[in-house]
Amino acid sequence: MTWTRCAKIAFIGSHGIRKTTAAHAFAGTVQRAGRPVEFAREVVRDNPLGINESATGEAQLWVLMSQIRQELQLAPKAQILVTDRSVMDNHAYYLRACDGQDRFAVTPLVTAWAATYDLVVRLLPDVPLRPDGTRSTADAFRDEVEAILDATLPAMVPATRLVAMPASEVRDGTDWWPLAERLAAQIGEPLGAPGTLPPRARGAVRRTGRPGGPAPSKAPQLALDLDGDAS
């Protein structure tokens, strides 16, 4: 059964907190549920105007508009859209670049667009920054962005659509199935496509040749590339 509309989930926060790893692993989980998935990658690395502490308001405006454009392009193509970042955390970088002022009057647009995410997963920065050759490793910079997000996010995303998760919990073996079920429940749809089974049930079929046999001790998970993640 095809869902009546695309569900959208965003993994957000400052840089270096395993958002990309989490988003890819979640996308793999919903694919195993038999749902077509599109992945909106982080756009900031394509920014021709500069990134990190020296980014200007114009540079962060480019990122915001590129984020929205990418989501508009991908949402019609799948039942679930998983985004690495969102307008909300990109807005926090924008405000920092503009010294706290909304120079281009984009906050109303960002607030309205925030309502298009069915579920928002905020990863909290409890892991150290690691150099990747692109993003800043300055703790003060990351802390500034997180403080702005602390102040702005509650007005944009209600608690019913927000999940807070320490970045340290994103690791090999993290079970994303309950989060996928919560996303499906947000729009009143079943997670599994017809003919699919939850991870534990699928494991039981493989081991016993029939449903209802002993379940494996742990649901199968997508291997996570923690060392290669920079966002």
Image: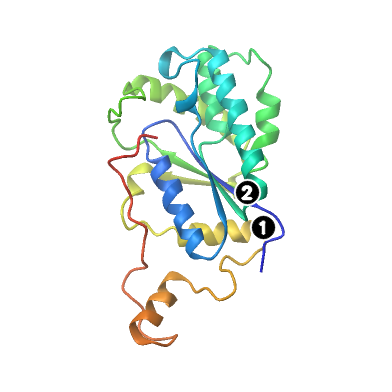
Image point 35% across, 86% down: which residue? 208
Q: Position of residue 202 (x, y in %)?
A: 42, 75
* Placement of 117 over or under 79, stated as above or below: above
* Placement of 205 over or under 118, stated as above or below: below
Q: Write down the quadrant of residue 167 in the picture.
A: top left
Q: Position of residue 101 (x, y in %)?
A: 60, 13
Image point 33% across, 51% down: which residue? 224
Query: Where does label 2 land, which residue?
Result: 118
Q: Position of residue 177 (x, y in %)?
A: 46, 62
Image point 52% across, 73% down: which residue? 196
Residue 135 left/right relative to 177: left
* Placement of 138 over or under 222, stated as above or below: above
Name the kind of residue labelled 1 in the image.
Answer: Ile
Estimate how packed mark 2 is, as few (under 14), some (14 to 19) or many (20 or more) residues with alpha carbons within 10 Å: many
Circle on res. 187: 1
> Distance of mark 2 from mark 1, alpha carbons?
8 Å
Pick whichever of labels 2 and 1 is earlier in the sequence: 2
Name the kind of residue labelled 2 in the image.
Answer: Asp
Say what secondary structure mark 2 lies in: loop
Say what secondary structure mark 1 lies in: loop
